């Protein structure tokens, strides 16, 4: 049985690959030998990304664009390095862009809870506090379909951050949820669709209300960053998360 800290690769949807670990995942969408990177993991994950692409006869140069779901450092750990090497644009919601200017201090997490302690330790081990600032960033807006491999559609789901957005791959019936929905309870480690805990949200009540923006989507793959993916109707994932509430 694999541990959350183990590196793994999963084809989470056709031509959509999840890399990283159970603690922090990130995604590559492949299309005709070109890629879109959705979030970019932690700096300590760089070798996995490089080796995965090499195994497909590709390289970092084949990453045509990066799309960030929001500004938090565990979602953009390799973004500046990829941008420098590939020359491709990096996109984020216009509300979150100003927050990329500096690395914020870590939130005051209740690390006496074992699951949170292990997560924080994992972040430190994989250099989360050494994320390079992004020097060139473009923006997207709600409802926009980005002209990048995979053609993700932006669904603005504010609350975790004010600019937080999910990426909808309509033709694959897949939703990349960022931190709007995770695959596990951050405080207990219990598996299942969950909202992010209150201590990392800008506005937890808004995060809960924003789930209405995704629950009617025609998708049966909830592709998460933290914890395992959920395969089933997005409406069911939203129902489970609402019942669990915000911790």
Image (cartoon, helix red, strand yellow):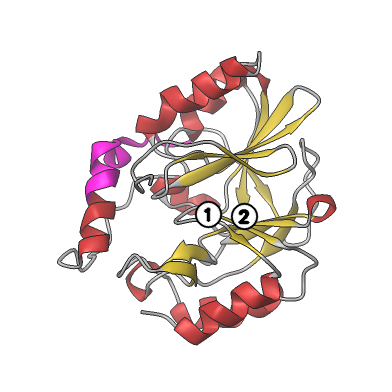
First reached walking from the N terminus: tag 1 or tag 2: 1
Q: Is residue 242 left or right of residue 114?
A: right
Residue placed at 42% from the left, 38% from the top? 77
Residues in magenta, as a range: 121-134
Residue placed at 48% from the left, 72% from the top? 195
Distance Cα–Cα, label 1 vs label 2:
7 Å
Whether the residues at callouts 1 and 2 have beta carbons within 8 Å, the answer is yes
- Asked if 213 appears above or below 127 in the picture, the reply is below
- Asked if 210 appears above or below 228 in the picture, the reply is below
Task: Look at the numbered disc 2 and give the secondary structure of its residue.
Answer: strand
Question: Can the viewer see residue 105 in this picture?
Answer: no
- Estimate the x, y position of residue 222 in percent, counting from the top left: 63, 60
Task: Look at the numbered disc 1 and give the secondary structure of its residue.
Answer: loop
Q: Residues within 10 Å of mark 2 (few under 14, many from 20)?
A: many
Name the mark on residue 93: 2
> 135 or 53, which lies in front?
53
Residue placed at 57% from the left, 70% from the top? 158
Name the mark on residue 70: 1
* 132 falls in the magenta region: yes
> 130 or 197, which lies in front?
197
- Estimate the x, y position of residue 100 in percent, counting from the top left: 45, 47
Image quarter where the C terminus lies is: bottom left
Q: In which image quadrant can residue 28 be found?
A: top right
Q: In which image quadrant can residue 147 be found?
A: top right
Q: Residue furthest left?
A: 112
Q: Residue furthest right?
A: 171
């Amino acid at each position: 049985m694999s541990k959350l800290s183990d590196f793994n690769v999963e084809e989470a949807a056709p031509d959509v690959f999840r890399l990283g670990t159970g603690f922090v995942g990130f995604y590559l969408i492949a299309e005709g030998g070109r890629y879109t990177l959705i979030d970019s993991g932690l700096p300590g994950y760089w070798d996995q990304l490089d080796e995965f692409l090499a195994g497909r006869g590709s390289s970092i140069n084949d990453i045509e664009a990066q799309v960030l779901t929001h500004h938090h450092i565990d979602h953009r750990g390799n973004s500046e390095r990829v941008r420098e090497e590939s020359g491709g644009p990096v996109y984020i919601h216009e509300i979150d862009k100003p927050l990329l200017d500096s690395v914020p201090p870590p939130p005051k997490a209740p690390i006496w809870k074992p699951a949170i302690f292990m997560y924080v330790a994992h972040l430190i081990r994989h250099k989360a506090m050494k994320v390079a600032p992004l020097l060139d960033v473009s923006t997207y807006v709600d409802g926009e379909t980005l002209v990048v491999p995979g053609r993700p559609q932006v669904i603005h789901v504010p609350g975790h951050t004010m600019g937080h957005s999910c990426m909808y791959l309509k033709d694959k019936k897949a939703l990349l949820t960022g931190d709007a929905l995770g695959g596990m309870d951050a405080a207990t480690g219990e598996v299942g669709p969950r909202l992010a805990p209150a201590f990392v949200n800008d506005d937890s009540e808004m995060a809960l209300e924003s789930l209405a923006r995704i629950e009617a989507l025609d998708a049966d793959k909830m592709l998460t960053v933290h914890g395992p993916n959920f395969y089933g109707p997005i409406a069911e994932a939203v129902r489970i998360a609402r019942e669990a509430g915000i911790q």
